[in-house]
Amino acid sequence: MTGGTALARTLTGTGTVPALTPACDDGDDPTPEQTEGPYFKPNSPERTSLLEPGLPGTRLTVTGYVFGRACRPLSGVLLDFWQADGNGAYDNTGFRLRGHQYTDSRGSFALTTIVPGLYPGRTRHLHVKLQAPNRPVLTTQLYFPNEPRNNTDTIFDPRLLMTVRDAGGGREAAFDFVLDVPQDPGPGTPTPPGDAWTVGVAYRAGDRVTYAGRGYVCLQPHTAQPGWEPPAVPALWRAA
């Protein structure tokens, strides 16, 4: 599997593995659309952190990449996030827990926020709109694995599950989007050889390593531990 496979490999509440979202190998599987719901507001502030003084909740970091149909990263993509607070309430008068940002030159994004709360009829989720320059808007939602309400929420789509893990008293999540943006695959460019993956090394997003003769790119900062070899942890490493 080449390119940016979306990080949706965590077991669902039924114990089955959901379909990858999307495969990003044949150019015809953009990330699924979902309703924006009644709480979207335009003109959110540009920021990568939605945290504010006195905001209660469990800290959540969401990282990932945005790819086009040829599995190449897209820079300058607008991502507009909004969500409920820890009590399941949306701020409809201001812009609390609302903000937009743009992917960098590597097509990556990072959002710092809190884990959203629950409210009647819905499972835990994040809202997001994405728009590549001069392209249509994709509106969708991201979900958390192993939530009891995933099985009863009629909007829930397992293809939109993030990979989530506990980290440092908070949670870290990862998801890669694929937009319906035509791309020229371009000439093949082999990955430059990097240092061999090593336990105990503190890796940063974008670092390149080799493992078992194959190259990988780090998706989010972490310190390597036994069992976290690149092929075994797709939330941390993407094959290059």
Image (spheres, helix red, strand yellow):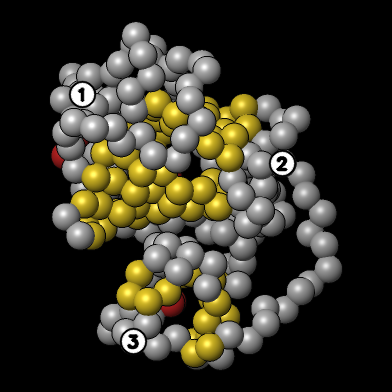
Whether 216 is drawn above or below 124: the answer is: below
Mark pair 2, 3: CA separation: 38 Å
Classify residue 198 by image quadrant: bottom left
Q: Is residue 7 left or right of residue 28?
A: left
Q: Which mark is residue 181?
A: 2
x and y percentages locating residue 216 in the rendered image: 54, 76
Tell me how many marks there are: 3
- Seen at 83% across and 68% down, the residue is 187
Do callouts 2 and 1 mark residues in contact (Cβ within 8 Å)?
A: no
x and y percentages locating residue 23 in the rendered image: 56, 55
Which circle's residue, 1 or 3, is located before the other in the chain?
1
Disc 3, SS: loop
| Residue that extends furthest to the front in the rendered view of this protein | 53
| Residue occupied by mark 1 | 88
The disc labelled 1 sits on which kind of residue? Gly
Front residue of this view, candidates 217 and 110: 110
Q: Is residue 219 left or right of residue 146?
A: right
Do callouts 2 and 3 mark residues in contact (Cβ within 8 Å)?
A: no
Residue density around tag 3, few if under 14, some if 14–19, many if 20 or more, within 10 Å: few
x and y percentages locating residue 95 in the rendered image: 38, 19
Whether 93 is drawn above or below 186: the answer is: above
- Seen at 58% across and 68% down, the residue is 1
Do callouts 1 and 3 mark residues in contact (Cβ within 8 Å)?
A: no
x and y percentages locating residue 139 in the rendered image: 52, 28
| Residue occupied by mark 3 | 199
- Seen at 82% across and 62% down, the residue is 186
Disc 2, SS: loop
Residue density around tag 1, few if under 14, some if 14–19, many if 20 or more, within 10 Å: some
Disc 1, SS: loop
The disc labelled 2 sits on which kind of residue? Val
